[in-house]
Image (cartoon, rainbow, N blue to C red):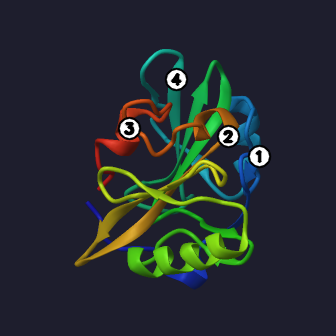
Amino acid sequence: MSWDAVAADERIRWELEPLHRVGPLRFGMTAEGVEQALEGELVPDRWGRVQPHYGPVVSHGFNLPHDRPAWTAVTAYFSDGRLTGAAVDARRGPQVFLEGLPLVGRVPSELEADLTAYEATHDVYLQHNHLGDITSEELGLFSSTQRSHNVLLTRAMLVDSVWAQRIGDYTETYLPTAEWRDRMW
């Protein structure tokens, strides 16, 4: 397994419009629409794996085009055939900005300080779940961590308005268990 993270200045840059879109991905898109939107930036998992999750939820992985071995940069989650969430890998994924605030590949304490300052000036509420991860229903954000060598970096799960409901409550969340129980190393 590669513990190396893509350098900040080499990452793809995406903007977040909470509950509506992340980068070129609009919540509600089909799998085909997601593939088309990512064309030129990320490529579908070369094995074409579709991972089943509870009920009508499946996920598709997307990798950096020249990353060998190919580690997943973004995992797209679909419920009933429509994009409902996108998990952005801490090491390989695009840098996602919320009004200029970078969310991915950061030291968790620094992101928490920046999000706390953001919360003070915006109509959002931050929570911590049972594992200490930062969540926000208003932002559709679940920020967890991944290891890169000897540091932890932030990973962002960004979701639509339906999945944002109770995003911080692991007993009632819509998030697949892989996102809150199984740590993505």
Q: Which mark is residue 79?
A: none
Residue 39 visible, this orientation: no
Q: Kindly identify which numbered label has been placed on residue 57.
A: 4
Q: On screen, 178 above or below 52?
A: below
Any mark on residue 170, and which?
A: 3
Asked if marks 1 and 2 touch (Cβ < 8 Å), the reply is yes
Task: Using residue 69 as the reference point, say whether residue 48 is left or right of it.
Answer: right
- Going from the N terminus, do you reach mark 4 or mark 2 first? 4
Q: Residue at 43%, 67% (x, y): give it.
A: 154
Q: Amino acid at mark 4?
A: Val
Mark 3, mark 4: which one is toward the viewer? Answer: 3
Residue 25 versus residue 80 in the image, above or below: below
Q: Is residue 59 left or right of residue 98?
A: left
Rendered image: mark on residue 160: 2
**Above or below: residue 140 compared with residue 8:** above
Q: Which labelled disc corresponds to residue 20?
A: 1
Q: Which residue is drawn at the image coordinates 76% and 42% (left, top)?
A: 36
Cα separation between marks 3 and 4: 17 Å
